[in-house]
Amino acid sequence: MKRAALYARVSTSDQNCDTQLLDLRQLAEQRGFAITETYIDHGISGARAKRPGLDQLMADARRGKVDVLLIWSFDRLARSVRHLIEVLDELSKLGIEFISFREAIDTSAALGRALIVIIGAIGELERNLIIERVRAGMRRARLEGRHIGRRPLELDRESIVRDRGRGLSLGELARTYRASRTTIRRVLGGAPKGIAQSSSQPNENRRPETAA
């Protein structure tokens, strides 16, 4: 009986791998594989080649602990076509089969290996086209004078400086004006010198005077 390893990954912490693992366990049972280990990368982007679960999987594969690797879809495993080919090449050299549930691809056959490379190339092309469309839209928006990204905070500098002068701390100012302490410091730092100096708390960081 072949020893099967399952690998699953989700990109965000609020997702889970239950659906992926359910399908993979059923597939392993249908194929008559014995699941020896399950590797999971939780809340980790597929753009990262280095992942704890994937790294452990490949380390165990090199130690001869795996006969076949099951994944839910090849984009769960690889960040690009090049990365995918590198992983498949190493698995092939180690004599490990690769099966993708969603694409129904099995690299134990030559056709399966060819198909996975073709599908990966199409997927990468689609991602690049999406990126280009987004960039083109941003360029057009800039040319039309439209704002891109988060709107800057509109803060009342005079009120912040006045409240600072009344003795409010940075934390209190941040809560009052719904801004970060860094933003409040930047506002205070950009105030005219005379106002900025008067905005410090009375006797703040001063030692009490002693009689001569």
Image: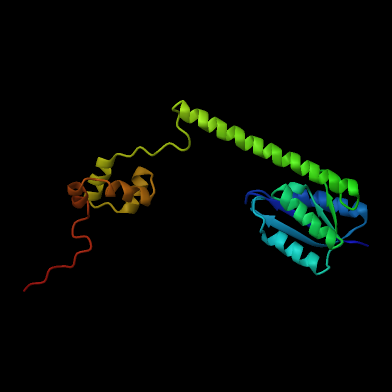
Residue 103 drawn at (x, y percent): 82, 43
Identify the image quadrant of the N terminus. Answer: bottom right
Identify the residue shown where x is 18% and y is 67%.
Answer: 207
Identify the residue shown where x is 35% and y is 37%.
Answer: 154
Identify the residue shown where x is 26% and y is 41%.
Answer: 159
Residue 65 drawn at (x, y percent): 83, 67
Identify the residue shown where x is 90% and y is 49%.
Answer: 110
Q: How many marks?
A: 0
Q: Is residue 51 above or below residue 207?
A: above
> In the drawing, does residue 66 fall left or right of residue 177?
right
Q: Which one is nearer the viewer's eye here, 42 or 60? A: 60
Q: Which one is nearer the viewer's eye here, 169 or 69? A: 69
Q: Is residue 129 above or below residue 59?
A: above
Asked if residue 77 shows in the view, the reply is no
> In the drawing, does residue 184 fall left or right of residue 18?
left
Q: Which one is nearer the viewer's eye here, 178 or 32? A: 32
Of all residues, the one furthest to the bottom in this rendering is: 212
Residue 99 drawn at (x, y percent): 84, 51
> In the drawing, does residue 189 fall left or right of residue 111?
left
Give residue 135's quadrant in the image. Answer: top right
Residue 163 drawn at (x, y percent): 25, 46
Q: How was this image coloured?
A: rainbow
Q: Is residue 90 above or below residue 16?
A: below
Asked if residue 100 shows in the view, the reply is yes
Identify the image quadrant of the C terminus. Answer: bottom left
